[in-house]
Amino acid sequence: MTDYRRKATAAHGTLRIIAADMAGTALEIQRAHQAAPVAAAAMGRLAAAAAILASDFKNPALMIVEVEGDGPLGRVVAEVRSGGKVRARADHPQIVLPLRPDGKLAVGQAVGSQGVFKVTREDPSGALYQGQVALVSGEIGVDFAQYYTLSEQIPSAVAVGVLVGTGGEVAAAGGLVIQALPGSQEYIEPVIARLGRLERISHRLAGGESIEQLAEDVIGGPLDWFAKEPIYYGCECSQTRSLEILSSLPRAELEALIEDEGAEVVCHYCHSAYRFSLKQLEQLLIQAAD
Ligand SMILES: [Zn+2]
C-alpha cells in the first residue's frame, strides 16, 4: 500500500480540498503498538488529521496533533515531519471497548469528550506555533473540524475514518477536508451536509474507491488534482537520540535509571529498545548537572 496526500480546488477556487489515503501508515502504527481496534482507529484518524494539517504549510519541520481526553485511551499523539513521515502513540493502546450501537468503533468513548485537541507546528527555523480547542466528542473528525473553524478561522467539512477488518487489523484509512476560502462561506454549508451523508469513508476506501473519487462525489463533479505527496510510517528514534535524552536528564533521574548492567531506553512510538553500558552511563553521570 502506498499512502499519499493530495489537494484540489473547486467552485472557481473558492473551495479547497485536501485528501489523504493513510491505509498503510495506519496499519504500521497499529502493528508498532499491537494496538486493539479502537486504539488503532483513534491513532489512524489522528494521523490523517496531522497529515492534512501539515499540508497547510509550505514545509513544516514537524506537525504534532494531540488529543488529551478523559477516556480510557489516555493521551493520543500523531506526528508528521516534512517529507511525509508519520508516527503515532496512545497511552493505553490495548484497551478494548464494545462497538457502538451503530456498529462503529467507540473512538469517542475511548478518547473521552472532556479535554483538548491541540496542534503544535515547528517551522524549519525551530519556531513553535500552538493552538488548541476543547474536545467536542472525542471522535476526532468533529474535533478536527472544530479546530479548523475556531482556531484557524477556516470553515471546514471533515471526514476521517479507519476501517478495522474482521481479522482485527486496519484495512482502510483516510481523511477528507473541504474548506471554504474567505468570502465563500455560503458554499461550505451544502458541502458539510453532503459530506455528512457520505457513507463511512473507510468502508468506501476498503471497497476499492479512491479518496479522490469520494471527494468528487461530495463536490458533485470532477476536480483538478495537484500531484500526490507521499505519506509513510517511520520513527525518529535512534541510539544517538536516546543518548541525547539520557544526557539531558538531571543526575538524580539518571542514577535512578541505572541498573546493574546499564540502562535501556525504549521508544514510546515504535518500542525499539536502545541499551547503554554501565561505562557509558558513568561517563554521562560525570557530565550530568545536579
Ligand atoms: Zn521509535
Image (spheres, grey):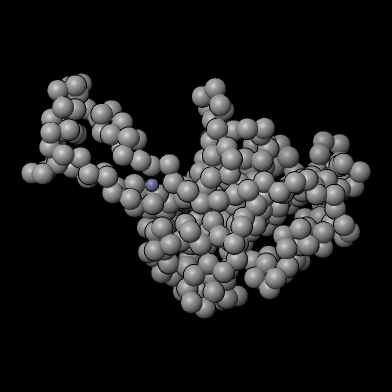
Residue 209's x, y, as percent? 73, 68
Q: Residue furthest bottom?
A: 166
Residue 189's x, y, as percent? 82, 52
At x 43% / y 67%, what residue is drawn?
A: 36
Residue 207's x, y, as percent? 68, 73
Where 218 falls versus 5 (above or below)? Answer: below
Q: Quadrant of residue 122?
A: top right
Q: Residue furthest right?
A: 12
Would residue 228 be seen by someone viewing this image from the given angle?
yes
Q: Quadrant of residue 236?
A: top left
Residue 163's x, y, as percent? 58, 68
At x 66% / y 40%, what residue is drawn?
A: 55
Nearer-the-camera pick, 198 or 173: 173
| Quarter placement of the C terminus | top left
Where 53 falls versus 142 (above or below)? Answer: above
At x 65% / y 57%, what residue is drawn?
A: 21
Q: Residue furthest left?
A: 260
16 with respect to 220 (left or right): left
280 with respect to 193 (left or right): left
194 with respect to 85 (left or right): right
| Quarter placement of the N terminus | bottom right
Q: Total label count?
A: 0
Would residue 147 be seen by someone viewing this image from the given angle?
no
